[in-house]
Image: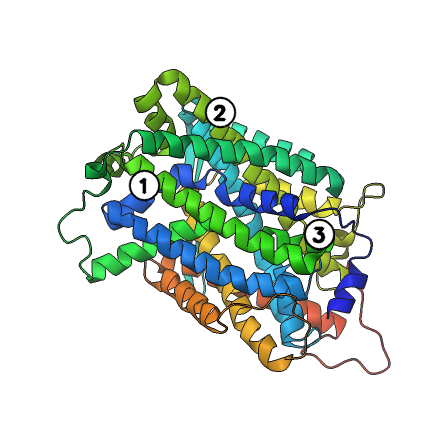
Amino acid sequence: MAEKSSSENAQLVRGLGLGGSIALNVNLMIGVGPFITMPLVIEAMGGPQAMLGWVLGALLAMCDGLIVAELGAAMPGAGGSYAYIRDIYGRNKLGRLLSFLFVWQLTFSAPLSIASGCIGFSLYAAYLWPGLLRQLGSYHLSLPMPLIGRLHADLVLTHGTALAVAACLVAMLLAYRRINMIGRVSQFLFWGVLGTILWVIFAGFTHFHSSLAFDFPPGAFRFSAGFFTGLGAAMLVATYDYWGYYNICFLGGEVRNPGRNIPRAVIYSIVLVAALYLSMTLGVIGVIPWRELLVTAHSHARDFVISAFMDRIYGHGAAVVVTLLILWTAFASVFSLMLGYSRVPYAAALDGNYFRVFGRLHPKHRFPHVSILTLGLVAVAFCSLKLIDVIAALVVIRLLLQFLVQAVGLIVLRVRRPDLERPFRMWLYPVPALLAIAGFIYILISRPDFGKELRYGFAILVAGLVIYAVRAWRRAEWPFPPRAGGAASPES
């Protein structure tokens, strides 16, 4: 499998080192998420015990990170999870269907992820320009689906929607270039990201009040049904905020010494970001009472909590500066998302499991330009959705059609291919893989009204199965038998 991956990606340039790889991951992981979602995590658990959601989210990220670290080192080609799922379950067997479904869901989840960063960018910018929040119109969409139920979506158009679209288009333009330059751009953005969050942490701990940070409400740790439901909701948001440690795996065909650098980039990114998130959250609730954060969860103030935090400590000027830095951070995340995800349809198109147009490389700089343009333009269309709806739908779709399949796949691969060269092996195997599977299932079913997002996931799954079946029948591919005396029909 490793040999075939190498030949498939021979045209790509291995120009990313360890520093650039970590920078790409961290840029994506931090983004605007933790700056906006902090009140949502507090609301989910009703007090500073919400820190537990961040801690368990970090442990879940590490468990899954060990999965992608082993797979990424063993199969370092473009496409990441697409290639892993395809090769684990069989290129011309079940793996063909599952890997197609992965790319199919990515058609929705990748633009949703990019759009979430763009929407967050515009929401935070409203601290500087409140007129961006002015609503121009809203629309409720409801689509009945046989056997699944109704799918609901709310579209909200504001002045900020135009800013979100602009951020998406600029990131797309910046990603439209040679990978060697991308590594330098990523590290430049990385230092802005790191500097922003370190400043917030410094501000929090130099004005920290333990009486605020540990002001637990009565029954905070009573293991009731409400506690576990709230923990599930908190972990869903935390999972979204931690995601991105696998980003470098999508660029595996462009990483130098991938057997060494991919696992290190994944693990170092998780440890670094977990430490930053936990420190920042503890510092903020040690300055702003959690009950006040709970109130902001139901108002526009939740969109710029850190700006209000810095205003309280240093004044309005510092709040403006940190807002600008958070906008930098949000943009860096959007850039990293677009860059990483664009390599997945490219890898699928190379082996005929997606539309051939996505396999085209830029004639001069050798990067998948069609894929970048497509994902970017679809993300533009999603910029009118509500941020919380985008996050919930994104997490559920991705857990169903990527993370669970991949976690099970690692165990399957260990059984089927014990002889496969593995430059990195999961620590304490199979415990992290089993914990990841259990954690993902818990998040899927433990939240209030969890069926809403599950319907989205099942609708995408069913549509993908139908499209794959029609396509496979036309091309005489698995599970259909080859046509006697004829070649499979081409797919454009």
| Residue that carries the numbered disc 1 in the rendered image | 282
Q: Is residue 50 visible?
A: yes
The amino acid beneath tag 2 is Leu
10 Å crowding of disc 1: few (<14), some (14-19), many (20+) = many
Identity of the residue drawn at 57% across and 47% down? 25
Residue designated by label 2: 324
Residue 351 occupies which quadrant of the picture? bottom right
Amino acid type at circle 1 is: Leu
Image coordinates of residue 266 in percent, x first then y, are 56, 54
Q: Are marks 1 and 2 in contact (CB under 8 Å)?
A: no
Tell me the CA gap for discs 1 and 2.
22 Å
Mark 3 and mark 1 in contact (Cβ < 8 Å)?
no
Circle 3/circle 2 CB separation < 8 Å: no
The residue located at (65%, 54%) in the rendering is: 261
Residue 192 is left or right of residue 299, and the answer is right
Give the side of residue 81 with respect to residue 152, left or right: right
In the picture, the quarter occupied by the N terminus is bottom right
Q: Amino acid at mark 3?
A: Val
